Amino acid sequence: MANKLIKQMGLPNSIANIFTARNIITAKDALSLTEFELMEQLDVGMAEVKSAMAHISEVVCPPCQTALLLMEQRVRDERSAGHLPTRLRGLDEALCGGIPFGVVTELVGPAGIGKTQFCLKLSLLASLPENCGGLDGRVIYIDVESKFSSTRLIQIGIENFPEIFLKKGMAQEMAGRIVILRPTSLSEFTESLHHVQVSLLQKQVKLLIIDSMAALVLGEHDCGASRQQALGWHVSFIKSLAEFSRIPIVVTNQVRSQIGDEPLTFSFQVRSHSIKKEDRAAYDSHLVAALGINWAHAVTIRLVLEARSGQRFIKLAKSPISPPLAFPFNITSSGLVLLDDDGIEMKGSEINTIHCQGQKALFNSEW
């Protein structure tokens, strides 16, 4: 609006012509000068200058909005941008439709908690035909730790969508829409991202999954400073891919142990003071998300998967529009299944804390 022409602002012709004659063409030109400077250049009185400047300011300034209107607009923008439904009803409702397009969504949790199972289900949902609730597109799955299982993928598909996957040749067709990349180094991973950028332009890619970037970054860089430097470019590139392509990008993240006396440098590293010293043995460790502060700020949605008292939970720990909720879940032959669609509202630091209580018995189960 600053470049709007003064002659198009509805000022009286007498004063508008003077602005033009003095080469003050746009609103920016006029607003860059003080009232006294305008009086001198336009050779008019202060009353005329004030009246003209008030009119110009009113035209170019955005209208006032309440916090409620801004919040409602944010929700409308999120919904219109599109979502990939997870088919987990309570989580989809909390996220206003599912995994949002155009941003980075993170799954963080200990090994064996269900992150890859979740990613397999999302891959299927993105590749399904639109009349079945899918995105009818291709998926690029960057499988850093070689955890992708085509057998498990087909099993989840048959359990959830038998009308599609039991038809002759349909399982192969659906699986054929998911392209697997397996970089073995950070340099190969970087090259993979460049290939992904080209594929987004040339093919109908509707979902990008990185499972997991932490394995490469943490494996090649022991020093915190060099690790953050290596991560910085990748953070920016992945965010730009999401914004440019307007597709959902899902990245899994590992966890690391929090040493008892280690300072809590970041806001998302939260130590629970409610655990008594004698009870800490019940926890395999107190965990925090890996990758550090730059990564924590880069993700728009953070879903924390944890285990407490022999029960798995998926927590909506970070979202610009959703409340902090926790949903108990199980992993079955059909994938992740919520046990409660209403969720449990979390307060205080507990939403960011990552528990592994009772993980040994839980993670040794069939799924």
Image (cartoon, rainbow, N blue to C red):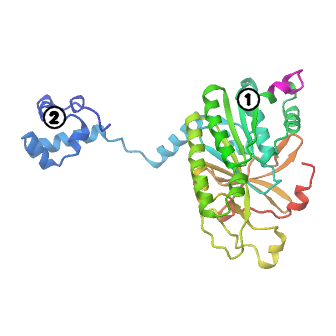
| Tag 1 residue | 133
Residue 169 forms part of the magenta stretch: yes
Instruction: Locate residue 74, reporting x and y percent.
Output: 53, 42
Q: Amino acid at mark 1?
A: Gly
Could you tell me residue 300's position as x and y percent?
A: 60, 48
Q: CA distance from mark 2 to mark 1?
A: 58 Å
Q: In which quadrant of the rendered view does residue 355 lie? A: bottom right
Location of residue 324 with respect to 160 vertically, above or below: below
Question: Magenta segment range?
Answer: 164-174
The image quadrant where one finds the N terminus is top left
- Is 98 on the left or on the right of 235, as rendered? right
Front residue of this view, candidates 55 and 168: 168
Please give the label number shown on residue 43: none
Which structural element holds mark 1?
A: loop
The residue at the far top in this view is 168
In the displayed structure, 139 sits above or below 103; it is above
Instruction: Identify residue for label 2.
Output: 23
Mark 2 or 1: in front is 2
Q: Residue furthest bottom?
A: 278
Mark 2: give few (<14), some (14-19) or many (20+) Cα within 10 Å.
few
Magenta segment's dominant SS is helix
Residue sitting at 86 percent across and 63 percent down? 358
Q: Is residue 315 visible?
A: no
- In front of the other: 231 or 254: 231
In front of the other: 102 or 195: 195
